[in-house]
Image (cartoon, rainbow, N blue to C red):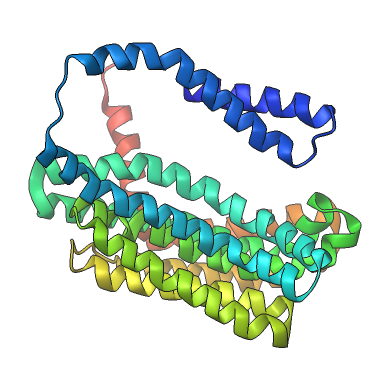
């Protein structure tokens, strides 16, 4: 059903865009697709519900758990969009275009990684908690956090290092320079946001203390509004970038502190320090590549960065990935023919 809804939204939006509805086309497309899916599924859902009964205690339990989650998602949207409205109010639409171009390059790229890791890691943490309690959860969480750091820290730094050639290839020439300036800052905020949402926020849902999640999201959302109001009028686009990174950093700190009151998730310090070291060496190596521009610079920097980072993490056995990989290979070879 999700695939049908997404495909339907795309098709309806494409037709409406062709007819000239502009930016409203995709929004209308999503609405139409959702309405069609609701009409398709409502009869069967209604038939199932007719045999049920209302239970007030269970409804209150669901409301107490779900309402803070829903409100926190609204605050997450506020946190990620406030800066654009304030840039438009204090500066102009051109500044918003530059900001959004760089934001999309960095944030969307990291989102793909974090969503993939979260989709696999979230159910694994639930299963570990149900199977072995907090002890087994700690083991699974440490492994998940190690892998998340190992993949996402170098990805964020790598985006910053290739911001110029990537912007030249992916953004129009009139926005490329500005987008290249924006991308490193948004890569940093995207890394902080991803670690917060897809790892540390698990403490609130697994510990069933979602009211703390609402507080953890309210702090950075309010800070983002205040910082943008203070910094954009004085520093312009840079003010919005500084406010974004600072807000997501504050959100991470708030989630760690409040999450510990619900369920303490481990921080794998050794893999973290090893990853930071490998990423720093990667950054020094990639910085030596001359600014060739375009595909040549992008491929050279990406290839060199991946090689250097991979070699160091393999030598250090960061997150025990080398050991586990070799164990899998040995097990495969030991299987009878």
In the rendering, at what x and y percent does residue 156 appear?
Answer: 57, 62
Q: Depth check: give the residue in front, 277 or 335.
A: 277
Residue 259 sits in quarter: bottom left
The quadrant where residue 25 appears = top right
Q: Residue at x 52, y 64 (%)?
A: 79
- Of residue 109 and residue 315, the one placed in the foreground of this image is 109
In the rendered image, which quarter is residue 272 located in? bottom left
Residue at far bottom of view: 234
User: Residue placed farthest to the right in the image?
Assistant: 174
Q: Would residue 311 be visible to someone looking at this image? A: no
Q: Is residue 168 above or below residue 215?
A: above
Residue 167 vs residue 256: left or right? Answer: right
Q: Position of residue 136 (x, y in %)?
A: 14, 50
Q: Position of residue 128 (x, y in %)?
A: 17, 44
Q: Position of residue 59 (x, y in %)?
A: 18, 39
- Residue 37 can be seen, yes or no: yes
Question: Which residue: 47% across, 69% down?
Answer: 221
Q: Residue at x 63, y 71 (%)?
A: 185
From the image, which quarter does the C terminus lie in?
A: top left
């Amino acid at each position: 059903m999700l695939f049908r809804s997404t495909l339907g939204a795309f098709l309806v939006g494409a037709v409406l865009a062709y007819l000239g509805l502009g930016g409203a086309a995709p929004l209308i497309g999503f609405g139409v697709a959702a309405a069609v899916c609701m009409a398709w599924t409502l009869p069967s859902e209604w038939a199932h519900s007719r045999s049920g009964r209302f239970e007030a205690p269970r409804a209150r339990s669901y409301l107490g758990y779900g309402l803070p989650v829903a409100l926190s998602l609204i605050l997450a949207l506020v946190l990620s969009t406030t800066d654009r409205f304030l840039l438009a109010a204090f500066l102009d639409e051109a500044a918003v275009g530059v900001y959004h171009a760089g934001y999309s390059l960095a944030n969307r790229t990291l989102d793909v990684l974090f969503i993939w890791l979260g989709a696999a890691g979230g159910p694994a943490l639930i299963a570990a908690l149900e199977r072995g309690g907090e002890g087994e959860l700690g083991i699974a969480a440490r492994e998940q956090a190690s892998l998340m750091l190992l993949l996402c820290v170098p990805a964020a730094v790598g985006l910053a290092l290739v911001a110029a050639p990537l912007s030249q290839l992916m953004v129009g020439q009139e926005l490329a320079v500005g987008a290249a300036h924006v991308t490193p800052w948004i890569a940093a905020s995207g890394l902080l946001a991803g670690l917060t949402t897809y790892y540390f926020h698990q403490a609130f849902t697994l510990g069933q203390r979602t009211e703390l999640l609402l507080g953890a999201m309210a702090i950075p959302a309010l800070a983002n509004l205040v910082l943008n109001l203070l910094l954009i009028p004085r520093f312009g686009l840079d003010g919005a970038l500084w406010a974004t990174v600072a807000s997501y950093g504050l959100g991470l700190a708030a989630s760690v502190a409040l999450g510990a009151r619900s369920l303490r998730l481990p921080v794998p310090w050794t893999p973290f320090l090893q990853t930071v070291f490998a990423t720093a060496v990667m950054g020094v190596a990639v910085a030596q590549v001359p600014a060739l521009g375009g595909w040549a610079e992008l491929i050279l920097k990406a290839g060199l960065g991946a090689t250097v980072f991979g070699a160091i993490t393999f030598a250090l056995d960061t997150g025990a990935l080398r050991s586990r990989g070799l164990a899998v290979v040995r097990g495969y070879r030991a299987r009878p023919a």
